[in-house]
Image (cartoon, rainbow, N blue to C red):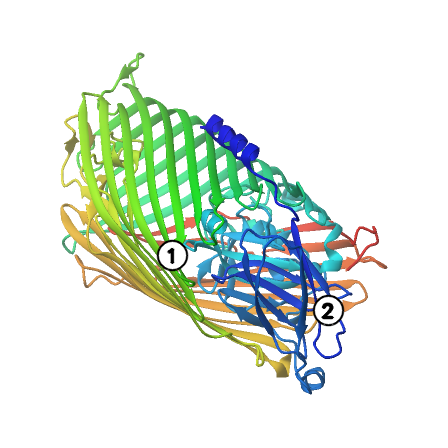
Amino acid sequence: MLKFSYLLLTVIFIHGVAFSQSTLNGKVRDQSSKETLPGAYVFVTSVAGDTLHTTFTDENGRFSFERPTQRTLDFSISFVGYETLEKRVQVTNRKNLGAFEMVEEGSLLETYELQAQTMSGQMKGDTVSMNAAAYQTRGQASAGELIRKMPGVVMQGGTVEVQGETVGRVLVDGEPFFGDDPAMALQNLPVEIIDRIEFLDQLSDQAQLTGFDDGETVKTINIITKKEKRGGKFGRLFAGYGTDDNYLVGGSVNFFNETQRITALGLSNNINQQNFSADDLSGAFGGNDNRRGGGGRRGNPLTTREMPGITHTNAIGLNFTDKFDEGRAKLNGSYFFNESRNFLNRNSSREYILPSDSLQLYDEVRNNEDRSQNHRLDLRLDYDMSDKHAIIWRPRVRYVNGTSNSLLSAQNLFNPNTPINETENTSSGANESFRFLSDFTYRYKFNKEGRTLSAKFDTRMDNRSSDSRLVSVSRDFLTGNRDSLIQNTLGKSNSFSYEAEIEYTEPIGDHSQIRLEYEVGNDLGNTLQEVSQREMEATRFVLDSTLSNEFENTYLQHEVGLGYRYNKNKIRIYSSFDYQVSLLDSDRLFPGFENTNRTFRNFVPRMVFIYDPNENTNIRIYYRGDTDAPSVRQLQDVIDNSNPIQISTGNPNLDQEYEHRLFTRIRKINPETNRSFFMYLGGQVTSNYLGNATYIASKDTLIQGDVLLRQGGQLNRPENLDQYWDLRSYFSFGFPLNFMESNLNLSARAGITNRPGLINDQTNYNRNVYVGPGIGISSNLGEHLDFNLSTRGNFNIVRSSLQESLNNNYYTQSTRLDLYWNFAGGFFVSTNVNNQWFQGLGEEFDQSVWLMNADLGYRFPPTEQFELKMTVFDLLNQNTSIDRNVTDVYIEDTRTQVVQQFFMLTLTYNLRAFGGTGAPGR
């Protein structure tokens, strides 16, 4: 497949004709006086409203930007005291766009200077542009600290949400920065280089090349830097040592030289900071939301999935961006290495929802030690070889190897005082995986505007292997019987998938365009599991054919589609109607041949409606149908008995899911009053939902005729179920509190989820209704005094159809205060106080937990680049990690170990040398 990509690239390059000038330029001036206007904001979009470039005029009123592929551009130019200039320009072979003349608004300039406050932001189609100067932060702050002050923005556990949607990408001046990891990018940019922050819906790669908006977007943050600070060196280096031999060493250094940008990072610590973060001690809280175990980020080249427990980490990373061939080619990439050692101690309690009023409880204590090494390489090439030919190529490589040791102690119980059975397991193993991914997109543009031909070819290759040993001793309290098991397992899996697509777009009239597409894809997988057992008193291992399995799977899908796009004035519409034919062919080769062959036929509609009633309001309605096939693991009917009282297996009779999704989003900003309003309302309904079926044995039972499941034990397997649906909503309202020089943000979440599950062949519907109000206040006092205060509640009403009288309602509230005060010269104090309140989880878990960290530091004059501080982590010694998990058939509460109180002395060097002069800046 790589050879095909190289061959196609070579052919395109040979036949492509290099286009003349690679940049466009112009100037902005006063219409009457003809004087140029330096500092005017130039916003360039396509006719579809997609953001192409943003820039400012220089001291001579001139601006320039890279020539886009589109030939028709919409300009919106704004300058204080002048009416906003809206102009559509046809770009042919010319390089100079000439002069854009603006009309003065009379006395508005004088009024603005005397009375108005700094405008916080404005709306441009789908893009919300926020003025960085309207939000004050402490000295030496990062971009993340600035953005979290803006309305509708929530940052937690390494994820960033904007108006209820998760951010998947960060750009700097329109160019990728740290791939798809928003938290990484925001941590590595100092606030003093930022001019504006844009929140936008970035189009897919193919849509960017063809100019045909297909409605597929990624929530993106675009950070626009100050022009005078786009060159130079900046970053931070730090080293700290504390009580209990705790340490933290690391840093990042950025080298910016116009289009060339390089960032180097390093990190080593034993306080649970698993990824580069804006908060040096963020990982010490023990998981997502800085409090809870589990979860994490996936797919980002410079981050690893955050693990619960305590992790020791050593990591290095490199990110680079550059342009060549007169700016027509853009190359960016990153390499990341992470070595970790994770220690997990977790207690969990489950209450199963049985068909009667009886109880079935499950308690577990788990102690794990895992070691792993991760290598990740990501590259991206964007190349406009000529006005007609363009490509995007994204190759990625992943390599992981690791070892694990685990001790598991678990019980099934009738009630808290009556155990049914128990197991004690010791396991160890090693694993290795290699993954290669490649996404290649090519576009040819015809002479007629809007007529394009594009091709896309994506490949995935994944190879995994594992070797593990299990020693288990189980006890039945009812009969007094004991069982022992010694088991070796060898596992291998190989998969390869490809997806090829060809797309043709054609304009029909001045405001419409159609798209024809054909797509074919295939997932091919092979898995092998060999399980050998021996009795405790025996010496020879024997292959267990019940637990062993060899499986081959193919999932071939054809799709043809017709799309339509309309764009005129304030309305944009995209709709498509696709027809899919999917063929599932699965073969169990061992033990015994068995074939599963199934064909699925579906219509998959999609519609996007966007309406801009005025320049400050944007309304978006989105609907899509989608299908999802079961995974290879879900289709395998091989038994996993690594926990003998909780075993699982697959289901070869699974069908694909079909999902309907609909959401509405409204955004409104008033730049005169600095008020903003965001609302999100959406939901989904899924048929053939891939849920779970749980069987709880009422007596000793043989599974597949050979595997013993003791009374009270559970067998879990995937099952297609109906009536899964989910409704959710979010709103935020932000406005300034001028009397205290701060900003107030009010928000709320509400939703309801209906999740089906089978338990002992009876359907249970777990319905979870939640309401989560929130309020936040952020200061605008300046760099010497800065604070952020926020609180978010979450009230959950949980009802189960099998036991309607069962009350599992619970309430959690998270409150946080961040305070920074530069009180004398270079001396400063800072603190963050977290409170977690749990109610309704039971006597053991209901509590109010305070976590307080405090810093006392000094920045050395005259540049204040060196900083020495003493940190106290968990001053009140109350840190803990509690979580509740509501599933289709049980309610689970967990408690996970976290880092406890320590003191640390840290020395930090803040590098600030902008403009390429080497002179330090602040």
Count of marks overlaid on the render: 2
**Looking at the image, is mark 2 or mark 1 nearer the viewer?**
2
Report x, y in % for residue 888: 25, 52
Amino acid on which the number 2 mark rests in the picture = His
Q: CA distance from mark 2 to mark 1?
A: 43 Å
Whether residue 81 is visible, yes or no, is yes
Residue toward you, 849 or 595:
595
**Counting other residues with Cα less than 10 Å from the Cα at mark 2, is it few (<14), some (14-19), or many (20 or more)?**
some
Report x, y in % for residue 185: 60, 51
Image height check: is 687 above or below 380? below
Report x, y in % for residue 586: 23, 29
Report x, y in % for residue 507: 41, 56
Q: Which residue is mark 2?
A: 784
Q: Is residue 877 left or right of residue 25?
A: left
Residue at 22% over, 47% down: 602
Q: Which residue is mark 1?
A: 844
Image height check: is 830 above or below 472? below
Amino acid on which the number 1 mark rests in the picture = Glu
Q: Which of the two labelled residues, at mark 2 and mark 1, occupies the earlier sequence position?
A: 2
Residue at 51% over, 35% down: 396
Residue at 58% over, 75% down: 743
Q: Secondary structure at mark 2?
A: loop
